[in-house]
Image (cartoon, rainbow, N blue to C red):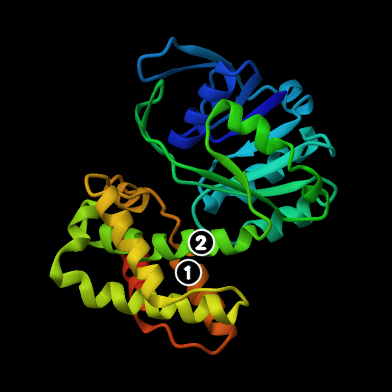
Amino acid sequence: MNFTVVGPGAIGSLWASYLKDAGHHISLWSRQTANQIVIKRDHCLANTFTNNDPSSVMNADVILVTLKAPIVEQVLTQMKSYINSDAIIVLMHNGMGTAEAIKTHLPDNPLLLATTTHGAYRPSSDLVSHTGRGKTLLGAANQKGQQCEFLVEVLNHALADVAWHHNIDQALWNKLAINCAINPLTAIHQIRNGELAQPQYHAQLTAIVSEVCAVINAQGFKAEENNLRQIIDEVILATSQNFSSMEQDIAHQRPSEIDFITGYVVKCAHQHNIAVPTNQALYNAVKQIEQRW
């Protein structure tokens, strides 16, 4: 199949590399200006990819979007004239809130949402390391997307495990809850994930989980505080040596995804008249840091 990977950061580069090794035709769309981009994954041979080529986008069967959430709408709007109406759009990024805008801009395209727990690190623009194996969940965001379950087999052949989720929003809310617990605290305090296991963060984590669970349930999905807290503690332990993406954004003075993580929870909470003071305070703190630059 023909894939265009939009936003070849760590996760995008990882998928581009694995998909090309699986025999697919892969092009990239990135902020880099070069016509070609070289990506080397771990100890594998380097692959060369066409970059920012409109004809490759026009021929793409799948547009895999691994951009950061804040720029998804802007970039896909710029690419809109090149995207075939039959191309499957796959949104794979942290946070929630981009799908509705994409449905408006590309109403005829099958739209899928994805979440992955694979770990990737990009020490430089041409290197990517697969730092932890995980699982990818895929699901439909519109009616045409429901006809695209076959893509699970394609992706699974390239980078297992991939599974179809009939209620992908539930899976995305679960992932969002984890991000709400880990990302803002690690970003504000500039610490590794594992530091959150220290006693001084216990009360804040408990409050975050309680507030997010209330919002998830109000949205019509299922969340139970004790179960969610256990999952978050397990993730903190499993990724103890990792820096969260938001921590890295703040460390490098880049705009973070706070509006699409904690900010999305706060927005939904307001719609249901639910008080989320801990999440609101964390959201405000990250925004204040960003405004200093």
Who's the residue at 60% across and 44% down the image? 163
What amino acid does circle 2 point to?
Phe
Q: Nearer the viewer, residue 153 or 29?
A: 153
- Return the residue found at the far top: 45
Q: Position of residue 120 (x, y in %)?
A: 39, 35
Who's the residue at 32% across and 49% down the image? 253
Say whether residue 285 is left or right of residue 95: left
Who's the residue at 41% across and 13% down the image? 44
Label 1: how many Cα within 10 Å (few below 14, some 14–19, many 20+) = many
- Return the residue found at the far left: 199
Q: Position of residue 158 (x, y in %)?
A: 57, 26
What residue is shown with label 2? 260
Where residue 263 is drawn, which disc sits there? 1
Where residue 33 is drawn, which disc sits there? none
Q: Nearer the viewer, residue 49 or 172?
A: 172
Tell me the quarter of the picture where residue 189 sits: bottom left
Q: Is residue 191 above or below residue 19?
A: below
Q: Is residue 198 above or below residue 28?
A: below
CA gap between label 1 and label 2 equals: 6 Å
Say whether residue 273 is left or right of residue 146: left
Q: Is residue 162 above or below residue 20?
A: below
